[in-house]
Amino acid sequence: MLARKTRGDTLLADDEREELMLTRRGSPSPSPEDRSELHASLAMDEKETAATTAIPVSVKDTWNFALLVVLYLLQGVPVGLAFGSIPFLLKAKMSYTQIGVFSLAHYPYSMKFLWSPIVDAVYNKEIGRRKSWIVPIQLLTGFMFLWLGINIDDWMSQDQIAVGTLTAVFFVLIFFSATQDIAVDGWALTLLSKDNVSYASTAQTIGLNSGYFLSFTVFLAFNSPAFSNKYFRSEPQEYGLVPLGGYLKFWSMMYFAITLWLVFLKKEERSHMDENDFDIKSVYKIILKIIRLPHMKSYMLVLLMAKIGFIANSAVTALKLLEKGFSKEDLALAVLIDFPFQIIFGYYAVRWSSGARPLKPWLWAFCAHLVCCVVAMLIVSGFPQDGVVTPTYFYMVLATTVTTSFTSTVAFVSMGAFMTVIADPVIGGTYMTLLNTLSNFGGTWPRFFVLKAVDYYTVSTCSVINKDNEEFSCASEPGKSLCQELQGECLMQQDGYYYVNSLCVTIGAVLLFTYIAPTIRYLESLNPKMWKLPKDES
């Protein structure tokens, strides 16, 4: 059973809370009377917190929380494929630059604010504001999964992958997922009661991570012939237990089943916010007014820059381990072990983010994440020369994976909790989507350039010449394969991964201490009302 969490719970010491509250009042030099009044207020907050923290969440909120987890899980399935499994499966046939091209399929998540006003403003009142979009989008995704499941195994078996076609198909899938995200984010603000709306970010963390890991780590493990033969077969086979096509067909059925349940068994209740109907043009005007808020511009800049320091680690490190000889099964196992920790981390992260400074954990997680990027790079550089992964090395990879995911989860939940507090529920779907889109775009826009830079700065040649009597590069997988066919050896003069990752971490650290940290402290000191437009403007 979930427990109610109030805004009175905090990580701040009393003196920190005191100074922060006085600053919010605009009192530069508080008088003794102000101090006394404030101490009395803090004491009252503590009494209220003690009286309410232990109150259980209603059965209705518990079931609605579970529904949000399921909807976010469905959203995480195509995301896990596009962001995780497909690049891993393609690595043996594609260069980092080509994988960078495929990463363009991620862009709908970073552009969804362009059509989020349509999702917020256009709906059928009989079906419901959010179900009007969730139902058709999930049905379309189910049909596309079914079609893709019939064809994708043939596509992936070709020697030359049609990168453009694959990118276009997954671009459409991620577009559907992003559209569903807009509707679910807006529904989360009204589906849960006011006292428990902060749990929406927890539902998102659990659901998205569950869908992502099912499509990434669990799928990769059961798709691997080595893993399947080792744990489930008495006679080895050349294929895994779960082919990609079969996995997609299974989830198409799940999409259909859950969508039908939504249609016939879940009624969307009208809220007071549904009385505020906007035409599409009005919503776009409201977005422009939100963007023009002075403090919103600073917040947008933070979101766009915050992930630069981590992007090389998240985009390349796992692929680099595979390149050096770390098996997909072992990597999947490491992330699979990490999964229950993600759930635990998400629970505690929402507690840590419930105080007067919800972004304080985010800042600590930012610093820890930069350290994890450096440690991961050192682990890659220390890969065993003989290619044999020892238990010690595996546990080092596992520890780094868990620690990195801890920092990511804390940052994600903390930022999500802050967004929930400042979002205007009148245009909740659009407001939350705008903020989430900017956060996603901060991790999307550098990815293509980082992957391309790794290839650009990598210098590796084969020890033998090709059929044209010329030296050739084996920095990419096709070059490596050709070098092996010619019985040559790839001679690495410079690995671009270390150069690019070091540069990203350095830029991230400089941005943190010179701009991001001071700006974050300023933004969370603002009254939440300052993030909402006046009624005459909204």
Image (spheres, rainbow, N blue to C red):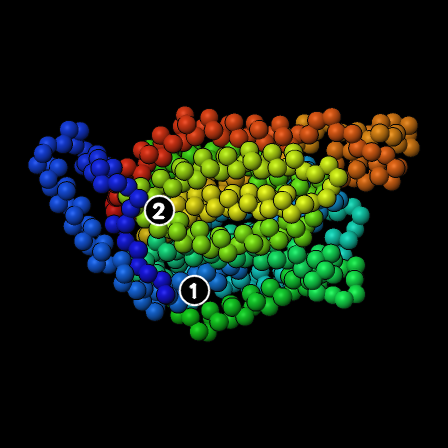
Query: Relative to 280, is 383 above or below?
Result: above
The residue that label 2 is drawn on is 353
Residue 530 vs residue 35: left or right?
A: right
The mark nearer the N terminus, 1 or 2, is 1
Q: Residue furthest left?
A: 33
Residue drawn at x 79%, y 37% is 480
Q: Is residue 119 visible?
A: no
**Along the line of sight, the residue nearer the viewer: 218 or 393:** 393
Q: Position of residue 244 (x, y in %)?
A: 68, 59
Which quadrant, please, contains the N terminus? bottom left
Residue found farthest to the bottom: 264
What residue is rendered at 31% in x and 33% in y?
Answer: 522
Q: Position of residue 66 (x, y in %)?
A: 43, 64
Query: Which of the 4 image quadrants contains residue 57?
Result: bottom left
SS type, badge 2: loop
Rounded to the nearest angstrom, the CA distance separating label 1 from label 2 is: 21 Å
Q: Tag 1's secondary structure?
A: helix
Q: Which residue is mark 1?
A: 66
Examine the rendering and report whether any part of residue 39 can be seen.
Answer: yes
Whole-percent x, y for residue 114 in the image: 47, 45
Camera-side mark, 1 or 2 = 2
Indicate left or right for 305 with 287 as reference: right
Disc 2: CA contacts within 10 A as few (<14), some (14-19) or many (>=20): many
- Above or below — where is 70 with respect to 334? below
Q: Is residue 124 above or below residue 30?
A: below
Front residue (pair 528, 225):
225
What label does residue 383 carry, if any?
none
Q: Is residue 503 above or below residue 535?
A: above
- The amino acid at mark 2 is Ser
Q: Amino acid at mark 1?
A: Ala
Question: How many marks do you count on the picture?
Answer: 2
